[in-house]
Amino acid sequence: MSHAPKSLAFVGGSADETEAHFYEALQAGDLERVMACWADEDDVICIHPGGPRLIGLGAIRSAFDAVFHNGSIRIQVEALRKIESMTSAVHSVRERIEVLTNEGPVEAYAIATNVYHKTAQGWRMVAHHASPGALHETPDITDTPHVLH
């Protein structure tokens, strides 16, 4: 029987569930819940918008701890695209983030790629790479024609 808190016990049933848990934990400003989403591997990678590449759980924990120093993150995930296999999943999402400025709250966007591996503990994040997006939502660019002839 697991002694983990109930909020951590369900992590890992699927890559989708781990991703939902990750973003819920970000919104709650809960460092332990964020870290419960990560694989226990030396080479996990996290890149915050405009930031350096963070390698390893210690560096990732420190970065999220610094982010949460100012409180939780108001973030909504949109436009999920995913590629999945039996043991890995790659999710590309648009993150809508509310940023507090001197003039008040402003919405901004980031584009993130989240990579998950199926581990003995369930589905866990092995990479999170978020790049700054536009100040306003921009449409995806695809090679699918919009008009069929």
Image (spheres, rainbow, N blue to C red):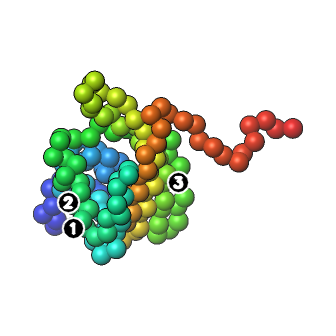
Q: Is residue 120 visible?
A: no
Question: Callout 1 environment at 10 Å: few (<14), some (14 to 19), or many (20+)?
Answer: few
Most extreme residue toward the right is 149
Q: Amino acid at mark 1?
A: Gly
User: Which quadrant is home to the C terminus?
Assistant: top right
Q: Position of residue 15 (x, y in %)?
A: 41, 57
Most extreme residue toward the left is 3
Residue at 46% over, 42% down: 133
Vertical placement of residue 147 versus 46, above or below: above
Sequence-earlier tag: 3 or 1 = 1
Position of 91 compared to 140: left or right?
Answer: left
Most extreme residue toward the bottom is 42
Sequence-earlier tag: 3 or 2 = 2
Gap in Å between the C-alphas at discs 3 and 1? 28 Å
Q: Which residue is mark 3?
A: 82
Vertical placement of residue 85 versus 6, above or below: below
Q: Nearer the viewer, mark 3 or mark 1?
A: 1
Q: Amino acid at mark 3?
A: Lys
Q: Which residue is mark 2?
A: 62
Residue at 41% over, 57% down: 129
Q: Which residue is mark 1?
A: 58
Q: Amino acid at mark 2?
A: Ser
Dividing the picture into quarters, in which one does residue 119 lie? Answer: bottom left
Question: Callout 3 environment at 10 Å: few (<14), some (14 to 19), or many (20+)?
Answer: some
Helix, strand, or loop for circle 3? Answer: strand
Q: Position of residue 134 (x, y in %)?
A: 48, 38
Q: Position of residue 112 (x, y in %)?
A: 44, 51
